[in-house]
Image: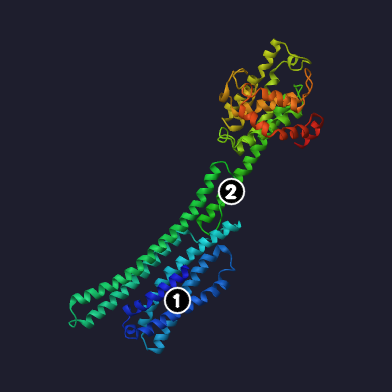
Amino acid sequence: MRAKLHYLAMMVVMPVYGIQVCPFIEDLNPFEVIASIDGLLLLMFLVRRPLYARAVDPTPLAGQALRAFVLELALLITAALVLSAYNMVVHDFPLASGFKILVGIVAMGFFASADLALERERLIASKVEREGLMLVPSSDFFPLTSKLAFSAGACTLLLVSVFTLLVIKDLDWLVAVSGTIPLYEARLSILKEFGFALLVALPETVNIILSFSRNLNMFLMRENGVLERVTAGHYDTHVPISSNDEFGVMAAHTNEMIQRIRERTNELNRTRDVTILTLASLAETRDNETGAHILRTQRYVKALAEYLRTHPRFAGELDDETIDLLYKSAPLHDIGKVGVPDAILLKPGKLTAEEFVVMKGHAKIGAEALEIAEKEFGSNSFLRLAREISLTHHEKWDGSGYPAGLRGDEIPISGRLMAVADVYDALISKRVYKPAFSHAKAMEIIREGRGRHFDPDVIDAMNAIEETFCKIAADFGDDREGHQQGSG
């Protein structure tokens, strides 16, 4: 469509331009002028598509914009040379007449070719993004600053040439008509010619500026959009490389940076996960509870969090990253038990009141240990959630829990979720002081604690995904502990 508009504009402007700048053309029949100029331009327009199919479309994407510019300009220069030769042979026009036509067509042709090349850049960028392609910028690319300087210089030179030709023609005309027409009519005629030239030149110049700006904005918005995602912690992205210039090189370096950040982040995440498992295993070696308890409770927590992520009270906090970290941090809920004396921790029976007071201290012991690490490495979500879970998973909704007696929403979401998971698993598991309860019995006890021990909305979520809890308990039963630890 842009090519049609450019060629249509030339077919309207060039016959008028030829008559304005060349007295020889002015003497011809207007129909003949229009037929010769527009006929050639129409022919060039018809052959450009087959030439594109042979000389531009099959070539590497990185060089297509430049090839499109050269092809468009070459077609129009050819049209100007053919027209000049035709006028010289058929009408015996002098060489100067052909030069004037050449300057006019080259001037409009340059604007058209530059605009169509910039459009080609946009088409390439869309294709690269749509099809997931990636160009490789060459080391000898044509710098963007040079493109701008060349375009500005060429536009200035061509416009100066056109207006110089108009001035020369008008000076000759003034000498020829001196004394035969009033001066004000001559002045008005010259002003009309210059006004016509400006009317053509200004829109073409503005169009090139806007086309350049559109491309620059497209490349900058893509770069900034990707950097914003990376800043937000999303490393599964890249900048499409669709140009062989500074923007292409910048995009390549940005993608390399993102790749390295992603690799380093994955390495840190693996280190974090190994650290969690190591600490959880340390606590497990000193506890009567089995390793399967850890595997089950972390999955209960994840299931509850995923269900509640759309709940108005929880949606603002339970995003993908937080849910994953809750899942990873849940095994540390009883890390503080490493500080409980063996005589109490491993006692094969019910604890006394004094012993239970000591046992309750494990929540603070674990939180304080994790807080030291948090201060050392900075407050990040992993250590914060691990500390919250360790400290608050024995708090109760009505404020009767420990160690701080927190009430309602004072208890972090992580602690509220872990409380339900921990109690449910303790109920369905065999302990030295109790037999394993059935799922139905455990649910009955859990529901009795709704609004007293547990957050009502969390219990409602548990009721909704009751079957998921049953499946987790079955898949990670104590009799399959060794297998599941190896595979999980």
Percent position of residue 176, x then y? 23, 83
Question: Which residue is labeled 1 in the image?
Answer: 77
For the residues labelled 1 and 2, the Cα–Cα distance comes to 44 Å
- Quarter holding residue 229: top right
- Indicate the secondary structure of the residue bearing disc 2: loop
Q: Are marks 1 and 2 in contact (CB under 8 Å)?
A: no
Amino acid type for the residue under numbered disc 1: Ile
Of marks 1 and 2, which one's residue comes earlier in the chain? 1
Percent position of residue 129, x then y? 57, 56
Residue 217 vs 459, above or below: the answer is below
Q: Is residue 468 visible?
A: yes
Percent position of residue 83, x then y? 42, 82
- Quarter holding residue 297: top right
Amino acid type for the residue under numbered disc 2: Thr
| Front label number (1 vs 2) | 2
- Answer few, some or many: residues within 10 Å of disc 1's Cα (few below 14, many 20 plus, some between 14 and 19): some
Q: Is residue 275 visible?
A: no
Q: Quadrant of the C terminus?
A: top right
Question: Which residue is labeled 2 in the image?
Answer: 237
- Indicate the secondary structure of the residue bearing disc 1: helix
Residue 398 vs 172, above or below: the answer is above
Residue 462 vs 9, above or below: the answer is above
Percent position of residue 50, x then y? 55, 75
Q: Viewed as shown, does residue 195 lie left or right of 314? A: left
Q: Viewed as shown, does residue 402 lie left or right of 25? A: right
> What residue is at 42 percent from the left and 64 percent from the top?
151
